[in-house]
Amino acid sequence: MNFTSVHFLCFFPFVVLCYYCLPLKLRWVWLLVSSYYFYMCWNPVYALLMLTSTFITYLCGIFIDSIRNSKSGDTSRKNIEKTIVIAGLCINLLILFFFKYFNFFNESFQYVWNSLGMSWKMNNFDLILPVGISFYTFHALGYIIDVFRGDYKPEKNFIKYALFVSFFPLLVAGPIVRASQLLPQFYEAHKFDIQRVWSGLLLILWGIFQKLMIADRLSILVNTVYNDVNHYQGFQFVIATVFFSFQILCDFSAYTDIAKGASQIMGINLIDNFNKPYFATSIKEFWRRWHISLSTWFKDYLYFPLGGSRNGKIQTYRNIMVVFLVSGLWHGANLTFLIWGGLHGFYQVLAMISKKYTNIIIDKLQIIRQGFSLKIFNILTTFILVNLAWIFFRANNFNDALFIYKNLFVTNFEVLFTENLYKMGLDIFEFRISLLLIVLLIGVNFIQTKISIRQFIMNLWLPIQWAICILSILSILVYGIYGNNYDASQFIYFQF
Amino acid sequence: MTIAKTCLFIALLSYSTVVLTTIFIPKNEIFYRCGQAPYYENPNTLDVIFIGSSHVEWGIDPNTIWEKYGIPAINYTVLGLDLKHSYFLLKEMLKYHQPKVMVIDVWRICDENDANALTNRIANMFPFSWNKIEMINSNPNLDSLHKKMDYYFPLHLYHTRKLDSTDFNFHYHNIERGHFVNFDKKNQEHVFNDCNTIASLTKTEVSYFERIIAYAKQEKIKLIFVSIPHLSSKIDLLKKINAIELLSNKNGIPFINFNKEKNFKAAGLIYSTDVANDSEINGHLNHLGAQKIASFLGEYLQKNYHLANKSKDIAYNFLNENLLTYKTNIKNNFPFSVPTKGNKLEKGMSLLPGDYLSSANNQYKLILQNDGNLVLYNNENKHTWATYTPEKGIVNLIMQEDGNLVLYGQNSTPFWASNTANKPNSFLILQDDGNLVIYQNNIPTWSSNTAQ
């Protein structure tokens, strides 16, 4: 069930209505049932997989808790806890590996072995990747590690724990939340608050606007170019890649906004996942603004356990590269994602190595560090670097990505002034609307650095609030990319 | 208070969406206008409603029924309508009107092949209602919510349309009352295929037939089934129509099958002159045919259902005014469609704007156009002679007693004359050779010199 589908438009109000009508004790059961129904709309069988993962990690937590309360010695207790955690992690990672990475590693090994002149043959499995497997697995893994570290007390109520893993707004594309952020909210009584509901609805509306108006419109051009790279070159790739950078931002941020808005309507607050990432002045800052929940997950559960930045520069560089390569692999079992992650790691390592020299240059040129010019320069540089990496992220395969890099710097500026500009999937009207919407998005992001637009709208006179809301809905109905005339794009992050 | 505000917001949003949908639905098709009949006709002013496909639209002229019998009637049609979907049209119409008789055309019974297109056309016409949902859900091809979206909410399908000025025209008043006026002629003969065998009907077909009867009974409305001429040679179709005729008879409902030679001729129809020259479809009637069917049905309705003549009723004056506009429009749009005044203009006779003379061999026409220009046309519709008097407010052309042929404007101002005064007992004739001549005692006194 897609967030922008009519199915969800019927499902969600019904869930909310029942949620507020039911007594507190039953609300969580209702949400669990709704979440499993939501998931089963994709593939009912894979709900069993999620249930298995939930059950295993729930038992891990219970066992750890019972061992902690037992009278056995500290060392043996620690060892048993470790064994349980490792077993829990391994089983979950194995499930993830089997469904998501088996074919990739199988093909890679075959390629390497065959290149070495040796024979290796094992058939791939013909499996559909379970939607959201990376997200709910990371929820569950984070929980076990938190319990093991003593950061969170194991959850005894299976229903609430199962709901933590499967809570439908964040089930298929995050944000990846910690048990300590979400589970306690399941114990609170959330009363119906019209202001909160209205605020949540506005956030959902903005999410749908970003998805149907911007992301899906830009995707038409992006798909046209990236699915047929041989027919384009130079500036056409630049346009397609810049469009993709805004497409993926709007797509993912739209999902998060809808998830946040939907949760907020039910009284549950989720963490921010995006914070105007294209205003970042460095790659490091970009990752503090982009997919924040995943970045912090990797930081807490991988980067710090690897040693973080405590063991000297070389180990720090290694740890950064490991985190970003794993992050790349998390996004997809494909060489292009691995390179994309690697590039981001490399950018950061390079920035750390060259920091000393860039400081010298800045001093010599007497550039004001807090100045506007340097900030703009850094924002643009970061944006360009991020875009260069997006090429690998979006390209259908490694060869396509290489082709784009090779032809990226062909100077065909004339394309801007000819009809060829409108032969990339969008006609002149749609192309101009796309540019306008990108400007609107940047404008909204900029204003949001100063004030909360949602709060501003909510402080306006009610008829004006309604007018804004109705006009936005009508704009989406008229200019949105939906209906059977379009091949509606799924949310990009569903595939991860 | 919160609930009231929420309801108001939803109402505003729904209304805006309905307006938007109305703009985006294509309205340039005549069928869309015909489909608006239930909503734009004066409520409860219809005694007879004809439901059917294009065969009804071309084949029945409700204005003729009004003119001759004073029965207020209208066509409610959808392109390709089958009997199954007639049920939904019947229900929709009866939400707004309480006619005395419903006449339903039987052509296709339950067409699964064209089901999506038909669902689409009707869905565009119907506002969102339970009847619309039921109609869409009855289509077996639409087995998922995703597939039904285009039909439930037409904006889903049409929001990508490029709009033009016609999309903002919400004037649906249909002067023709759902009739498509056409003057083409077949000009050939037809061999009737009076098939008398009967096909078996499917459960669905029988079910919808029974639903129509039950619904009409429930609403206390008399039903008549007809099969307006389509002159199909498809035996399967004819057999199905026979089956419906048999079922109608069993249920005591009249069935008039105009596709049978006997009934076709009983209505006074002549294939060569009353059937349109439509290459796609064999048997759409032209306007002359539609008038004949209308006359036949009007008489039948008056005789069997005792429908009062309402032409003198003040409440129905709008239909008299409509009839005048309708006739004027036909005169303007189809100048040679109205009966000719013959080929002669005797002394004292006149032509009004829109009137014309036709040569005896029907090859040449002299028309006093509505713009006031008197023009002589040849058989290729090219003008060979004219008075060049357009836009002068010409009122008539008179063959005066004194032998002078004069074009008069307002206040009897002459704008053109043949200058043949003092030649009494003259007449004007349009000859078979294309020459327009004034004769006095067989001696030509004036001519247009256009003999071919």
Image (cartoon, helix red, strand yellow):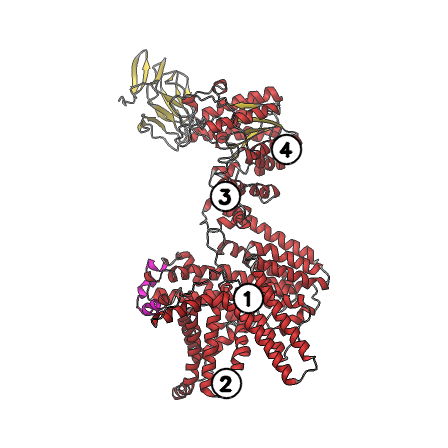
Q: Chain of mark 4?
A: B
Question: In whole angstroms, how far apart are the C-alphas of marks 1 and 2?
Answer: 31 Å
Q: Within 10 angstroms of label 2, few (less than 14), some, or many (20 or more) residues?
A: some
- Give me the disc on residue B169: 3
Q: Secondary structure at mark 4?
A: helix
Q: Quadrant of the C terminus of chain B?
A: top left
Q: Chain of mark 1?
A: A
Cβ atoms under marks 2 and 3 closer than 8 Å: no
Q: Quadrant of the N terminus of chain B?
A: bottom right
Q: Which residue is mark 2?
A: A309
Q: Secondary structure at mark 2?
A: loop
Q: Which residue is mark 1?
A: A256
Question: In whole angstroms, how far apart are the C-alphas of marks 3 and 4?
Answer: 34 Å
Cβ atoms under marks 1 and 2 closer than 8 Å: no
Question: In whole angstroms, how far apart are the C-alphas of marks 2 and 4?
Answer: 81 Å
Q: Mark 1, mark 2: which one is toward the viewer?
A: 2
